[in-house]
Amino acid sequence: MKIWSTLVVLFIVITMHAQTSPASLALIPEPVSVRTTKGQFTLPSQLVIAAPASAEMKEVTGTLVHRLATATGVKVSAVSYSPAASIQLELNKVKDNKIGTEGYNLSVTPKKIQLKANTPAGLFYAVQTLLQLFPKEIESDSVMHHVAWNVPAVEITDYPRFGWRGLMFDVTRHWFTKDEVKQFIDDMVRYKYNLLHLTLSNDEGWRIEIKGLPKLTEVGAWRVKKEGYFGTFSPPTPDEPRNYGGFYTQDDIRELVQYAKARFVNILPEIDVPGHSLAAVVSYPELSCTPDAKNYVVRSGEQIMDWSHGAPPIALIDNTLCPANERVYGFLDTVITQVAQLFPFEYIHMGGDETPQNFWKKTPEILELMKREGLKDMHEVQGYFEKRVEKIVQSKGKKFMGWDEIVEAGVTPTAGVMSWRGMKGGIEAAKTGHEVVMSPTTYAYLDYMQGDPITEPKVYASLRLNKAYEFEPLPEGVNAKYVKGGQGNLWTEQIANMRTVQYMLWPRALAIAESVWSPKEKKNWNSFFPRVEQHFARFDIADRKYSPAVYDPIFEVSRNADKSLKITLSTELPDLDIHYSFDNSFPDNHYPVYKGPLTPPKDAVMLKLITYRGNKPMGRMIYMPIEELNNRADKKK
C-alpha cells in the first residue's frame, strides 16, 4: 500500500511539473512568467478575432489577421466585439500596474485565446508572443497544408525590463531604401524591439533631404561603388561614376516615422558631427577648417584615417566640421530644425565619436578660439562645440544625445550618452547624472565577425553569440534610473545588401533582445540556445538569412616545445563533435573526432573541419590553411 501511495504522489509531482514547465516552448525573448496547462487550442476553420477598433489597434489586429490567414488558409474575420470570438484582444478597463505600458497577459485554453494589456503596445507584443506559440509554419508567406494548427494551453504574464530596446541601422556606408528600412522594422518588432536608431550622415553619405541645403543630397549622397574590403579600396579616379547611393526625401522620412509608430517603434535620428562629416564638408567646403576641403570627395571606402597610434585617429584628410567657424552653427541650426520637425522622438543623436584633432591643432582659427574661450586642449575644443550643438538641439524642444566621447569633452549632465567603447563610459556617465543607453562593442556590435575570420567578411573584431548573450545593460553599482536600456549596433561598412544585414543580425539580435526585455535572473544560455535553434527553423520558413557560425569550431594556436604547431579547438555548444582531415579530403562523421590539441603532419597544407551533432552535420565545412595557422601562432610571440 505504501508503494502504491508513493507512486501516486510521484505521478502527481511529475504531472504538476509537466504542466508548469515551459521547456517545450521556444519564446524569445523569455517572458517574465510562463505556466503551461492541460490541453491545446485548435484553430477553427472560420476564425473570429475580437479586438478594440481604433487607429492604434489597426496594426495590432491587422498583424494577427494577416499572419494567421496567410499561413493557415483559415478564413479570419475581425470584429470590435464578440463574446463568442475564439481570439479576444482586450484593453484593461482597470490598469494592471504590474505589467505597465508595454506588458501583457496571455491566456490560451482549449476553448479560446485571450490577450489583455493596458495599452495597444502591450497587445502588439502579446500578438508577437502568440505567433511564436503557433507551429513554425506560421512564418510562411503562403498557405501551409497538412499542419496541425494547435497552440499549447498556457498562461503568460510578461513585461519588459527596459524601456529602451534598440537596434541601430547604419544606412550611410551602404545605401538602403525606404522599403528595406521598413523590412528592418518588421523583423525587429517580432522580438519586441521598440527603438530604431537610424544613422543618417557619415563620411560615405548624407541620407536626408534638408530644405535650403540641396548639395547635401545632390553631392553628399553619392559615391563610387566599390567591392572588396571596405577601408582598403583604391582612391576613386575622376572618371569613375559617382552614382552609388541615395537619400530619403522628407516625405520618405514622414512615411518611415509613421510606419514605425504604427508598430510602436520610435526612430532616433543621428547626424554625426563634428567628425565623420566628410559628406557634408564635400557638399559645403566652407564648413571645414581646411582650405583643401574644396578638393575633397565623398569617401568610397578608401583609407582616410590612420588608427595605428590609437584614438583619436590621425586624419589623412580633414573630415570634421570646424568648431571655430560660425557658419557651422548656422548650418547645424538649419539641419537640426528640420530633423526635429520630422522625427517626433524626444532625442536627437549628434554623434561626437572618433573626432580627429590633428587638423584642428594647426588651424589658426581654432587656436584663436582656444585663447578667446580659455580652452586648454582639443578635448575642450570639442566640448565647446558639443555644448553649442546641445543648445541648438534643446532650442528645438529635443534632448541631445551623443557617443561616450562627449563625456570626455566635458558636456553637462543634461546630455544623453550612448556608451559604445565598452561599458566604462556609460558607467561613468550614469554616475555623474547622465541618462545612458548601453551599446558596447564588447557585446552589442553586430557588424563584428561571428565566427573565425577564415569564414567571415573581415572586420577588425569578433563577437560570438554566447558573448552577445552575456550583455547586461545595468552594471553593478549603477543607479537604474539613469540607464534607459540597451541596443545592438549594425554598422554597414562590409554590409552591402539586406541578406547580409539579416545574416549579421540573426541570431545575435535575439541575444540582445533577451538582454533588454527578459528578467536578469531568467537569462540562461543552456535554455536560450535550444530556443534559438527553433527560431532558425522559423527563419528558414520565413526566408530570413541567419548565421550558422555558432556551430563552427573556435581555433586557438600556439607552439609546442619543439616549435611545432599546436592547434586547440573548441565550440560554443557542448554537444558538438569536430571531425577533421589533413589529407585534403572532405571530412564527415566517419572521420577522426577531435579529442585534444592537434599537430599537423609534416607536409600538410590544409586542415578541414566540420561539426556534427550525432550523425547530423551542423557547422560549415571549414578550410583552414596550415600557413594561416602558422602565421597566427607567430603573431602571438
Image (cartoon, rainbow, N blue to C red):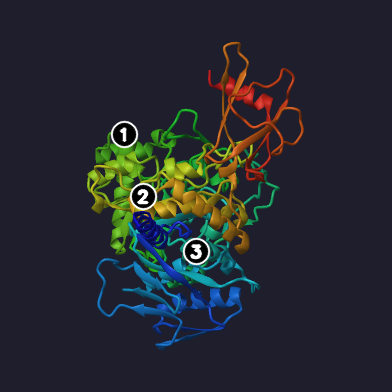
Please name the residue shown 71% across and 48% down the image. Answer: 239
- Element class at badge 3: helix
Q: Which residue occupies the foreground of this view, 127 or 149?
A: 149
Find disc 2 in the rendering and name its residue: 402
Does residue 189 lie above or below 384 as drawn? below
Left or right relative to 376: residue 635: right
Q: Which residue occupies the foreground of this view, 348 or 151?
A: 151
Closer mark to the observer between disc 2 and disc 3: 3
> Pointer 3: residues within 10 angstroms few (<14), some, or many (20+)?
many
- Element class at badge 1: loop
**Residue 335 spot, x, y in % from top left:** 41, 60
**Residue 289 spot, x, y in % from top left:** 43, 42
- Element class at badge 2: strand
| First along the sequence among labels 2 and 3 | 3
Q: CA distance from mark 2 to mark 3?
A: 23 Å
Closer mark to the observer between disc 2 and disc 1: 2
Please name the residue shown 58% across and 22% down the image. Answer: 633
| First along the sequence among labels 1 and 3 | 3
> Quadrant of residue 166 in the image?
bottom left
**Residue 336 spot, x, y in % from top left:** 38, 60
Does residue 274 lie above or below 348 as drawn? above
Q: Which mark is residue 185?
A: 3
- What amino acid is labelled 3 in the image? Ile
Q: Which mark is residue 377?
A: 1
> Pointer 2: residues within 10 angstroms few (<14), some, or many (20+)?
many
How many numbered badges does the structure rendering display?
3
Residue 266 visible in the current orientation? yes
> Quadrant of residue 604 in the image?
top right
Does residue 440 lie above or below 142 as drawn? above
Q: Which residue occupies the foreground of this view, 455 or 574?
A: 574
